[in-house]
Image: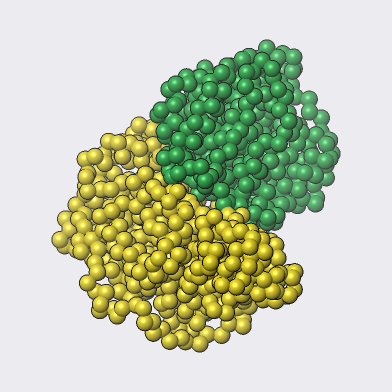
Chain colours: A yellow, B green
């Protein structure tokens, strides 16, 4: 719908800019070292000052109050006169109001898209995954240890190291042991209305496909969050070919049978061995692309994110969805200002309503904390050319591709439908990633312009750079460079296909992502809109 | 003031109960296996049902609405008729309203206390600590690495391991390397009014005395929380005898001089070596008790906590304060119901007002989240005999001893005065511990009845058990058993002195606490009352 048609325009002074939409009144500087005053762009516009890479050139003279247009949308209004060829940034444009949710009326859209092949043509693409009894498919084979309260973290950290050192080498088919030490479980108002968000997040993370239903829950004993609440309640279809019914187990440190630390460790190690034996029997099998559950996220964005990385990821998202798979995008404050473009993409009026309801919930949440969505943009975003949250949002939603939105999932909840979902989360990278894990993702695509070492240990994280400068410098941290799109060297569709193929390879375990090679993993962070006590 | 005078009363059937105050209408069962129906306690009361250890016996018949009294205070009202000798618990008493802050008028109190020796008699007690240039004293010698944003956590975790493995063995005077990976820094409303709480917490943790001002700040580059904000702003008195002026340093992963992960790691390792060289020159010196900054906390409490562990810790607290040292207690929801007992202990009307203001702030915070202080008690508290938050609070404040309260410190802030401080925090163990570290603690006393493996890597945590059953079972996790007090084997004063001596030994590094021996450490968790974006 609003995937940019990147037209790179070379000028006589090699001034390279991108105008995303023919109606745009600004264009983005592509040259890695920026452009100097006097440079000529788009054949006739002379820069009246130096403008860094990723920043905006005024394509016309703006009077005070004139709309500044990018992606064909108003991203702000001139707060003073801006000359043609001047640098447009957060200092000379104002922030528009977000679209009023009441004004957005749902009307169904036609979803015919020429660039995406028919579903049957995508059927030949497969990956090698771990099929679970509950129908989900893993992309890794991990012994998961979750906790009902952070009090036990000292011991679970100890155990994680001990298992990795002493037991993992004996079970070569198991990729890793991962402990989820979160900040919840006690010292919280467990019956407050918003408590459901962190509780279901912990519960559904334990059900992530990469744990193969072999989760261990370590509890203390006296905590408010009872470990039993974290066990899956869904029915597991029993597959007779599997020798042991995979099931989770619970252990309490305060259990009277443990005389001290040594016996607790022994108890956990014994429990771990049973689960490792079961996990070690898992084998990769050929799976349809429809079994992929891909979480799309961007972080440390720059002005190229919306031109290269996000549209490329969006194209790959369209391919996955067209093949019957699941993709979700998130980050409420980064879609809020583009919500008028997303509501028409809802599959029906109910989904449109749920989309607006999540925006309204977050508007209210921020207001309670005396903040608004303008708190989203970072110094790094601005340094990278994103003047405000409107411009950021318009680029951010490009990673959702162009598919219809089939469902909306509230924070911490699990997806219910295949296809493109909106999974409501804060935009904070590690909080969004945590909630996307709970939603059931088995593969993560993360687009960055400024660069972040972000990685998760539960699922592979494919890191896409929006510009080649970053990809070159962070050669060992970036998995896929979408930068060539900015220079017109490759099209979004070409690179979207490349990313799609890489995703299948990574999901199959044929290739490791950079953070898995280096062992770089962020801690998960819960979204807890409820109070501590 | 309300330190219980534990009179253990043996009866002919060995029914052992404790009545804390002669006016109490309930007493606590001490026998480790509980008491059976028919047991006689206090010479004439026959139990009409089995009552577990730590639970309450009715010492009189209660009509509906009669006050139930423990610690000489009303902990609830009978919600039905309760026979003499019956089990009093959360099912037959109601929760009273918390004291109305408006009704509590400050009148100064006389603080003459006979059991505590005069200050000059305590002057001979010392410990061996690390004196810092800013006047603070460390009890450990740690290379601290803090972060301005959680994005960098993958790399800081990697670095922590690498430093521990490759560098620490070369610097034998350095105890450890500790990374503080928190959940703040980006994806947050950094200008929201409550953002100051997490920001100053991170800042002041970096100034903890155990880091000796040699902190390293690892930033990403594009985050909202600028690393510069985390550096100390206070003046450091330069000591000419020290060869190098200790000072913190900052490193950004996005720094253009780093070509990829390998060079980042190299850059951090080089920076770490400089700091390790400085830290390695630190030597323990004889320090007065007045240099101790002791954080008192209880968690996983039971009915004995208020009878044994907390009063013993309170006695030791009085000794430290009398010797000119600093002690603080915390946990707003666990003092809220005893606030009428604390306000009179304020040193002046201003401190009394600040104490009430922190209660009011928290009342409002909980109300916004549609919760109240009754959300505090846990299933474990109740299992251990604490019927509600009033009873829990009355026992909890015993660990503050009987000294005047000289100052009140808001969440995340740093203490300004020696003596007994109230450091306002949530009661959540790891959140409270995190805020107490920010307040400047160099020694931690943690009292537990149900048992928790809680430990911190930045300061030694002395774990005190409220009952010997726990201390026996968790022989390798408990440092000090206050259980003998319940059986009248030792007095509170005797055990308070024992704990005081242990504290000096631990602070001197002469003895290691259990969690340091085993290497069990909880992750720190920030208190962020502001919204995520």
State left or right for residue B262 relative to residue A366. Answer: left
Residue A494 sits in quarter: bottom left
- Residue B442 pos. (x, y %): 61, 28
B372 over B180 or under it: above or below? below
Task: Please tell me which residue is depicted at 77% across the width and 44% down the height of the picture.
Answer: B354
Horizontal side, residue A384 vs residue B193: left or right? left
Observer-nearest of A440 and B148:
B148
In the image, residue A124 above or below residue B100: below
Query: Considering depth in this image, is A394 or A469 the residue closer to the camera?
Result: A469
Residue B333 visible to the viewer: yes
Residue furthest to the left in view is A241
Q: Residue at x 19, y 52 (%)?
A: A281
As drawn, which residue projects farthest toward the front? A12
Identified at 28% across, 68% down, the residue is A289
**The residue positioned farthest toward the top in the image shown:** B124
Residue B81 picture quarter: bottom right
Q: In the rendering, at what x and y percent does residue B200 appear?
A: 66, 43
Q: Which of these two is toward me, A10 or A321?
A: A10
- Whole-percent x, y for residue B137 in the image: 64, 24
Residue A303 appears in the figure? no
- Count of labels shown? 0
Q: Position of residue B322 (x, y in %)?
A: 72, 22
Horizontally, is A470 left or right of B311 in the view? left
Q: Nearer the viewer, residue A299 or A469?
A: A469
Q: Is residue A227 above or below residue B520?
A: below
- Up the image or down, A84 lies above or below B137; here it is below
Which residue is found at the position 43% from the left and 87% from the top?
A110
């Amino acid at each position: 719908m609003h995937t940019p048609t990147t037209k790179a325009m070379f000028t006589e002074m090699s001034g390279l800019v991108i105008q995303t939409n023919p109606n745009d009144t600004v264009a983005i500087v592509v040259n890695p070292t920026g452009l100097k005053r006097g440079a000529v762009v788009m054949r006739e516009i002379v820069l009246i000052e130096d403008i860094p890479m990723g920043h905006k050139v005024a394509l016309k003279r703006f009077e005070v109050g004139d709309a500044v247009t990018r992606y064909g949308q108003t991203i702000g209004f001139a707060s003073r006169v801006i000359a043609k060829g001047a640098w447009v940034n957060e200092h000379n444009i104002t922030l528009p109001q977000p679209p009023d949710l009441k004004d957005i009326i749902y009307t169904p859209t036609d979803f015919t898209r020429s660039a995406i092949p028919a579903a049957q043509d995508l059927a030949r693409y497969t990956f090698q995954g771990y099929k679970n009894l509950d129908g989900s498919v893993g992309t890794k084979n991990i012994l998961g240890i979750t906790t009902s309260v952070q009090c036990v973290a000292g011991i679970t950290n100890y155990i994680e190291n001990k298992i990795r050192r002493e037991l993992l080498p004996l079970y070569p088919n198991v990729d890793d042991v991962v402990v989820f030490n979160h900040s919840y479980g006690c010292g919280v108002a467990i019956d407050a209305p918003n408590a459901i968000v962190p509780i279901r997040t912990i519960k559904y993370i334990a059900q992530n496909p990469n744990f193969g239903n072999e989760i261990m829950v370590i509890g203390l004993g006296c905590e408010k969050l009872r470990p039993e609440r974290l066990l899956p309640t869904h029915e597991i279809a029993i597959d007779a070919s599997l020798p042991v019914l995979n099931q989770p187990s619970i252990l309490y440190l305060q259990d009277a049978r443990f005389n001290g630390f040594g016996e607790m460790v022994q108890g956990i190690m014994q429990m771990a061995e049973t689960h490792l034996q079961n996990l070690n029997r898992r084998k990769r099998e050929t799976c349809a692309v429809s079994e992929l559950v891909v979480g799309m996220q961007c972080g440390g964005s720059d002005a190229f994110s919306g031109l290269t990385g996000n549209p490329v990821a969006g194209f790959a998202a369209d391919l996955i969805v067209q093949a019957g798979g699941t993709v979700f995008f998130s980050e409420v404050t980064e879609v809020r200002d583009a919500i008028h473009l997303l509501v028409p993409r809802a599959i029906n009026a109910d989904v449109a309503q749920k989309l607006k309801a999540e925006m309204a919930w977050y508007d209210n949440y921020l207001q309670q904390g005396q903040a608004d969505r303008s708190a989203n943009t970072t110094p790094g975003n601005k340094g990278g050319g994103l003047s405000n949250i409107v411009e950021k949002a318009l680029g951010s939603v490009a990673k959702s591709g162009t598919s219809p939105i089939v469902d909306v999932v509230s924070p911490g909840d699990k997806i219910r439908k295949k296809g493109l979902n909106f999974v409501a989360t804060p935009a904070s990278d590690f909080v969004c990633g945590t909630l996307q894990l709970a939603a059931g993702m088995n593969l993560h695509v993360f687009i960055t312009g400024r660069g972040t070492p972000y990685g998760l240990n539960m699922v592979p994280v494919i890191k896409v750079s929006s510009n080649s400068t970053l990809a070159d410098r962070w050669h060992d941290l970036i998995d896929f460079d979408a930068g060539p799109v900015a220079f017109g060297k490759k099209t979004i569709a070409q690179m979207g296909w490349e990313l799609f193929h890489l995703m299948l390879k990574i999901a199959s375990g044929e290739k490791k992502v950079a953070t898995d090679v280096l062992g770089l993993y962020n801690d998960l962070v819960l979204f807890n809109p409820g109070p501590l006590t």
